[in-house]
Image (cartoon, grey):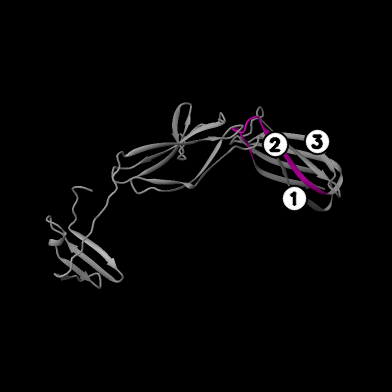
Amino acid sequence: MAGRRYALVLVTTGDHYVAMTNTDNGVVQGTFFVSTDGAFFAGNLVDDLKLRLYFAQFERSRLSIELAPLQLAGGILDIDILNEGITPPACRTDFEVQVNGAWVPLDGAPNGPNLTGLPAILPLRVTLTGTTDLMPGFGLSNSQVIVSRPKTTFTWIGETKTLGSPTTSIKIITDLQAYEEAKHDCAVTLRTGATLATTETADVVQDETLPNGTIRRTSVFNMTATSKYEVRIVGSTTTAADLFLVSELIEFAQS
C-alpha cells in the first residue's frame, strides 16, 4: 500500500531467521542479517534480499450483499445457517432477513426477527463490517440455510409397562407448560390388554394451575383388570408459532 515503509522484515527459511533493515532510500541500501537461533543476528554485507509487499485495500468499510430469498410453503418459523467464512477481530458478519420492510439481524438477540406470522418468503442478505484495510469474507459453496417450522399436531407413545399384578385403576399426571385451552389440546389415552388392542379413555380429567402457570392435568382410568398398558398422548395447536410443552409425566398403577 502506498506510503507504508517497514524498518525490519523477518523471513524464516527452515531453522534460519533472516532479518533486513531498510532505509528510506531503498532495499539495497540496507544490511542483510542472518540468525540460526532466532536470538543473535549477524550482519551480511555481501548478500541482499529484494521483496515486494501487497496489502488489501477496500473501498468501503460496510457492505451488504443480498442473497437468494428463503422460501417454505406454509411459512417459516426457524432459520439455521451454516456459514463458511472468516471474521477477523474488530469485524462483523451479520446475516439479516427482511420483516415488515425492515432488515433484522439473525444474531440470537431477544429483539430478533418476529416470525410468528409464518412468512412463506423471506429476503436474505449478509452484511460485512470492517475497515478499509480489513474485512470479513464468506463462501457460498460450503454454506447452507435450513428453514423449518414445527408441526401443529403430535402423537407420543410411551414404553409398554408390565405390572407385577393386575390393576383396575391407573392415574396419569402430565404437566403442560405454556398451555392455553383456547389454542391447545392435549389428551391422554391408554392401550391395555395382552396385545394392547383395547383403547381406554379417561373417566376423570382434572386440571390444576400451578404457581408458575403450568397446568397439571390428572387423568384417571378405571378399567377391567389388566397387567399390561402403554400411555399415548395426542396434542395439537392452532398455529405452529404458539406451542406448549409436556414437561413431566407421572404414572400410578393402583391395586
Residue 48's place in the image compared with 155, above or below, is below
Q: Residue 25, located in which quarter of the rendered image?
A: bottom left
Mark 3, residue position:
203
Three-letter residue code for mark 2: Gly
Q: Main secondary structure of the magenta part?
A: strand
Label 2 crowd (10 A; few <14 / some 14-19 / many >=20): some
- Of residue 133 and residue 220, the one placed in the foreground of this image is 133
| 233 relative position to 66: left or right | right
In this picture, residue 169 sits left or right of residue 27: right
Give the residue furthest to the bottom.
Answer: 36
Residue 46's label in the rendered image is: none
Kindly indicate whether the residue at mark 1 contacts the one at mark 3 (C-beta within 8 angstroms).
no
Name the residue at 29% across, 42% down: 132
Residue 2 spot, x, y in % from top left: 20, 47
| Sequence-wise first label, 1 or 2 | 1
Which mark is on residue 235?
2
Confirm whether the magenta stretch covers residue 204. no
Q: Residue at (24%, 63%) from the top-left corner?
A: 10
Q: Calculate the distance from the C-alpha at mark 3 to the C-alpha at mark 1.
A: 22 Å
Q: Position of residue 234 (x, y in %)?
A: 72, 38
Which residue is identified by label 1? 159
Q: Nearer the viewer, mark 3 or mark 2?
A: 2
- Over which residues does the magenta segment extend? 228-245
